[in-house]
Amino acid sequence: MDTIEHYKSIIKKVLKNHASGYQMPNTEEYTEQLIIDDEHGHYLLMGVGWQQYKRLHGINLHIDIIGEKVYIQQDWTERGIALELEEQGIPKKDIVLAFHAPYRRPLIEEYAVR
């Protein structure tokens, strides 16, 4: 298995773990939807539902594969998805914390800038 295919399988595994079983407190109706576009390298976990009269609709996790790097575009997890990806075998040098502005990325040691 080549590196990118390996990264894709890790990303899907980690996102599936996040998607299973989470229920937002105090919601009448809420689901998390896992969206996988392997062909283009896009992976999203989004929440959809209602909390009384308030519509809930947003992206909780968004990861892209661009070139040979894993770009974390959005991360609303408590612990940080980058740590989970590292634990599963993706090195920091191949992870871009893209939710940080490009000028800040060099300040975050060991992670890729782009």
Image: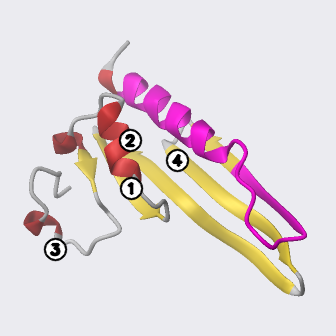
Question: Residue 104 shows which numbered tag?
Answer: 3
Looking at marks 1 and 3 on the same chain, the residue that comes earlier in the sequence is marked by 1
The span picked out in magenta is: 4-33
Looking at marks 4 and 2 on the same chain, the residue that comes earlier in the sequence is marked by 4
Q: Mark 1 and mark 4: span between their CA atoms?
A: 18 Å
Identify the residue under disc 4. 42
Up the image or down, 77 lies above or below 13; here it is below
Identify the residue under disc 1. 80
Is residue 13 in the magenta section? yes
| In this rendering, the label closer to the viewer, 2 or 3 | 2
Q: Would you say residue 66 is visible in this rendering? A: no
**SS for callout 2:** helix
**Residue drawn at the location 34% of the way across and 49% of the way down:** 82
Find residue 64 and report its horizontal and vertical position in percent.
Answer: 43, 49
Q: Counting other residues with Cα less than 10 Å from the Cα at mark 4, is it few (<14), some (14-19), or many (20 or more)?
A: some
Q: Is residue 26 left or right of residue 16?
A: right
Is there a contact, CB below 8 Å, between mark 1 and mark 2? yes
| Amino acid type at image mark 3 | Arg
Is there a contact, CB below 8 Å, between mark 1 and mark 4? no
Q: Mark 2 and mark 3: span between their CA atoms?
A: 22 Å
Up the image or down, 64 lies above or below 53; here it is above
Q: Mark 4 and mark 2: span between their CA atoms?
A: 18 Å
Question: Residue 84 shows which numbered tag?
Answer: 2
**SS for callout 3:** loop
| Amino acid type at image mark 2 | Glu
Which quadrant of the figure contains the C terminus? bottom left
